[in-house]
Amino acid sequence: MGEYSADLPLEPGTHIDRRRELAAQPPLAVSAAKHVITAATDAPREAALLLEQLAYAALNRTG
């Protein structure tokens, strides 16, 4: 994923909608989600769920 701005014009029904939504999210949360998705892709289901829980807990501690 490249750099995107929340100020991009929307084109309804396209992937631009999703990019704008992601650009508006906290950067740390987006980064954590990308890392979890990458790591969990080839991991067993239980390990993937644990990664998600750990990321969620870490993000909750950052405020």
Image (cartoon, rainbow, N blue to C red):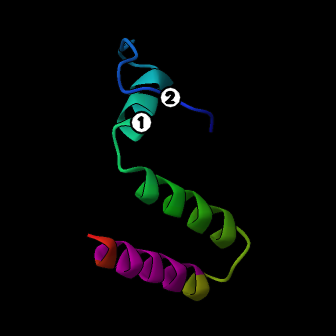
The verdict on residue 19 being magenta is: no
Indicate which disc, 1 or 2, sits on the residue closer to the N terminus: 2
To which residue does mark 1 refer? Answer: 23
To which residue does mark 2 refer? Answer: 4
Q: Secondary structure at mark 2?
A: loop
Type of secondary structure dominating the magenta stretch: helix
Return the residue found at the far right.
42
In this view, the residue in front, 8 or 61, is 61
Residue range in magenta is 48-60
Which quadrant holds the N terminus? top right
Asked whether the beta carbons under mark 1 and mark 2 sit within 8 Å of each other, the answer is yes
Q: CA distance from mark 1 to mark 2?
A: 6 Å
Measured as percent of width and height from the top left, residue 31 is found at 53, 56
The answer to whether 41 is drawn above or below residue 47 in the figure is above
Circle 2: residue type: Tyr
Residue 47: image tag: none
